[in-house]
């Protein structure tokens, strides 16, 4: 029996992004041939992808001074 291993949200998001990239590559331009239910799911993925926050740090985050605890 396998154990359940929860993953961090940032890793889950990275996995989702990778799956999306692979689906985009596999389905590139072939949307007209998809069954209706699969088309609905692909459309829902696109909607959710537009609403997801970016994991890329802003320039301000990258240039913020490092605070070292004493």
Image (cartoon, helix red, strand yellow):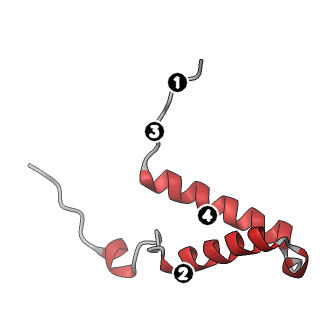
| Residue occupied by mark 1 | 3
- Decide which of tag 4 and tag 3 comes sooner along the chain: 3
* Distance Cα–Cα, label 2 vs label 1: 33 Å
Q: Name the residue under label 3.
A: 6
Tell me the tag on residue 63: none
Vertical placement of residue 55 versus 6, above or below: below
Give the mark, 2 or 1, whose residue is nearer the N terminus. 1
Coordinates of residue 40 in the picture (x, y in percent): 70, 74
- Name of the residue lying farthest toward the left: 70
Image mark for residue 50: 2
The residue sitting at 39% across, 80% down in the picture is: 59
Callout 4: helix, strand or loop? helix
User: Badge 4: few (under 14), some or many (20 or more) residues near its Cα, within 10 Å?
Assistant: few
Spatial CA distance of label 4 from label 1 is 25 Å
Q: Earlier in the sequence, mark 4 or mark 1?
A: 1
Residue at disc 1, secondary structure? loop
- Residue 48 % position (x, y): 54, 74
Disc 4 target residue: 17
Q: Closer to the camera, 37 or 10?
A: 37
In this rendering, would 9 be left or right of 65? right
Q: As drawn, is 54 to the left or to the right of 37? A: left
Q: Nearer the viewer, residue 52 or 65?
A: 52
Q: Nearer the viewer, residue 4 or 34?
A: 34
**Mark 3, secondary structure of its residue:** loop
Relative to 23, say whether 44 is above or below. below
Label 4, label 3: how many angstroms apart (C-alpha)?
18 Å
Image location (x, y in percent) of residue 38 = 76, 68
């Amino acid at each position: 029996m396998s154990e359940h291993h929860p993953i961090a949200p940032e890793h889950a998001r990275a996995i989702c992004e990778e799956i999306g990239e692979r689906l985009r590559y596999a389905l590139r331009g072939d949307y007209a041939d998809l069954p209706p239910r699969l088309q609905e799911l692909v459309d829902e993925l696109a909607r959710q992808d537009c609403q997801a926050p970016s994991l890329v740090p802003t320039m301000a985050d990258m240039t913020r001074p490092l605070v070292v605890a004493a």
